[in-house]
Amino acid sequence: MGELKNTFSWSFSAAEDFEQCRRRRYWSKYGMWGGWGRNASPEQKAAYRLCKMDNRWGLMGQAAENAIMWVLKQHQQGVPVDATAGWEQVARPFLTRKWNESSEGSWRHSPKQFCCLREHYYKTMDDENAAKRQVAAQVQNCIENFIDKVLPRIGSISPGQEFRIATPEQGGDVEHFFYEGVKIYSIPDYAYTIGDEVHIHDWKAGKIKAEQHRLQLSLYALWAIVKHGATLDKIFLYVEYLNEGQVLPFQLTEEDMEETQSLMSDSVGEMTEYLVDCDRDKNEPLPKEEWELTFDPANCGQCNFYEFCRPELERLR
Ligand code: SF4
């Protein structure tokens, strides 16, 4: 296999990272690159390990999503299942495995294969059993709400109507499209067609953040237009707040899409300024020191790369 190339790319989460802290974007896109290799430097290896780190809220979202997609697939095959089955057969084993991997430290040898929770790594969990109970209760609630409130709306969709979406769990490159020559990562949770309509759902196991989520889904609309030739007036978007049992359904106007495209262009332009010669083809980062630390120290509290910045942050205090 040829050497992997670190290509310039953009995604909604990359833009959020970059907005909150330039240095975080440096570590997660450039500092970690090659950190999986035997000959990587200790810094590259550590950055790669930290980059792969998860947290309990991320795990909660994955567990809920795995379980509801299993429930949906069972339903499509004519096997009705209840929330307990979704929890016992999918979410609970997943959470137990990941939590154990993290507390046992298997990730030290293979950060890609095994889960490392930020809460374990930085020892930020006061009461681990209470944290586990909270995650379990929220996941179970999400599965119940999915069965009660979402499944009746989407249960008649057949596998033939669904889009195949490349996720990180499948290995290989994840779902993306190219827009104005830039690789855009965009991974809708669930999308399907009804005639010439495209319907896209995003599962949210956490809090309602309507404005942020509308923006995120507008990128999925662009994915449907660019990659699948959809037309804007035929795209229907749904943010499914599983814990609350609420849905935010909406469509976008041409003005909304222009706003999304201009946000993307601005963000891509700013990221480009942090590259040598502003050359996205070479995609070589400026030295780490040029990527500023965050202006808001509150961002550091939830950041995987805190151990790298701690000495600098302490000097600045
Ligand atoms: S710890 Fe703070 S300064 Fe360092 S990368 Fe994270 S957010 Fe940025």
Image (cartoon, helix red, strand yellow):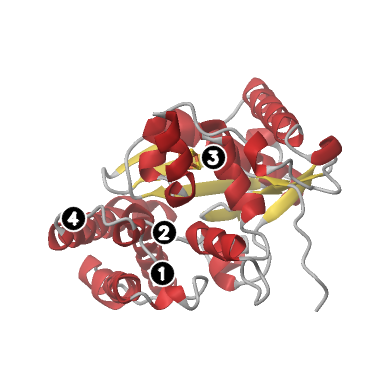
Along the horizontal axis of the image, is 70 left or right of 20? left
Q: Which mark is residue 134?
A: 4
- Local SS, label 2: loop
Would you place residue 160 above or below residue 315 in this image?
below
- If you read the primary sequence from the N terminus, does the residue marked by circle 1 or circle 4 appear first? 1
Q: For label 2, count other residues whose C-alpha is less than 10 Å away and answer few (under 14), some (14-19) or many (20+).
A: some
Query: Which residue position holds label 3?
Result: 17
- If you read the primary sequence from the N terminus, does the residue marked by circle 1 or circle 2 appear first? 2
Report x, y in % for residue 243.
27, 47
- If you read the primary sequence from the N terminus, does the residue marked by circle 4 or circle 2 appear first? 2
- If you read the primary sequence from the N terminus, does the residue marked by circle 1 or circle 3 appear first? 3
Along the horizontal axis of the image, is 15 left or right of 204? right
Label 4 amino acid? Gln
Can residue 130 be seen by looking at this rendering? yes
Would you place residue 24 above or below residue 91 in this image?
above
Frontmost of labels 4 and 2 is 2
- The span from disc 1 to disc 4 (Cα, nearest Å) is 19 Å
Residue at the extreme front: 315
- The span from disc 2 to disc 3 (Cα, nearest Å) is 15 Å
Label 2 amino acid? Asp
Query: Which residue position holds label 2?
Result: 54
Along the horizontal axis of the image, is 258 left or right of 158? right
Query: Which residue position holds label 1?
Result: 115
Can residue 165 be seen by looking at this rendering? no
- The span from disc 1 to disc 2 (Cα, nearest Å) is 7 Å
